[in-house]
Image (tube, helix red, strand yellow):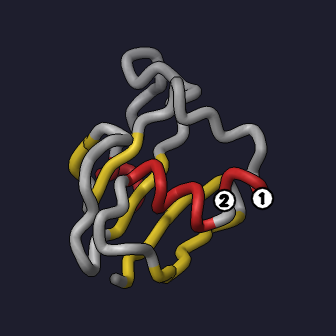
């Protein structure tokens, strides 16, 4: 079956369409994508993953057409980042 795998870093977005066996898991899809070799700093023991924006476990079964997303850790605390006032931009 065909699935997608997405990962982004500042200045670089990767979205791959790959073929996986019908009984594949999220972890197997990520492994087959080659992203772990291309980005060795991805740590699936700490980074969250999702399918179409919904968090899932690495053992979750894939369905045809699923898009796996590997999420990067948040590096800024949203509570401490000043909000931009959109009214000032007019």
Q: Is residue 48 left or right of residue 47?
A: left
Instruction: Tell me residue 10's x, y (percent).
Output: 68, 54
- For label 2, the residue is 35
Q: 5 or 7, which lies in front?
A: 5
Q: For the view shown, which residue lies furthest in the top direction? A: 80
x then y, percent, for residue 56: 26, 42
Image position of 58 (left or right of 14): left
Residue drawn at 36 percent across, 62 percent down: 24
Compared to 86, does 48 lie above or below? Answer: above
In the image, residue 72 lies at what x, y percent? 54, 40
Q: Nearer the viewer, residue 1 or 76?
A: 1
| Residue tagged 1 | 38
Please give the name of the residue rendered at 38% of the width and 53% of the height, measured from the top-left corner: 26
Q: Quadrant of the N terminus?
A: bottom left
Q: Secondary structure at mark 2?
A: helix
- Per the image, label 1 sits on a secondary structure element best described as helix
Viewed as shown, does residue 40 lie left or right of 47?
right
* Image: 3 above or below 71: below
- Residue 66, relative to residue 27: is it above or below? below
Pointer 2 with pointer 1, Cβ within 8 A? yes
**Residue in the image at 26% along x and 47% along y:** 60
Image coords of residue 20 (percent x, y): 44, 74
**Along the viewing direction, whichever of 14 and 76 lies nearer the viewer:** 14
- Compute the Cα span from label 2 to label 1: 5 Å
Quarter that holds the C terminus = bottom left
Q: Neighbour class for label 2 at 10 Å: few (<14), some, many (≥20)?
A: some
Disc 1: CA contacts within 10 A as few (<14), some (14-19) or many (>=20) = few
Residue 10 has which mark? none
The quarter of the displayed image where residue 21 is located: bottom left
Query: Foreground: 76 or 6?
Result: 6
Location of residue 8 (image quadrant): bottom right
Q: Residue at x 39, y 33 (%)?
A: 83
């Amino acid at each position: 079956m065909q699935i997608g795998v997405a990962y982004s870093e500042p200045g670089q977005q990767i979205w791959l369409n790959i073929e996986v066996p019908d009984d594949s898991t999220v972890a197997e899809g990520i492994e087959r994508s080659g992203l772990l070799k291309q980005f060795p700093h991805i740590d699936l023991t700490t980074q969250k993953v999702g399918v179409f924006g919904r968090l899932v476990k690495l053992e979750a079964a894939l369905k045809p057409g699923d898009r796996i997303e590997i999420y990067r850790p948040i590096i800024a605390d949203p509570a401490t980042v000043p909000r931009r006032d959109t009214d000032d931009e007019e």
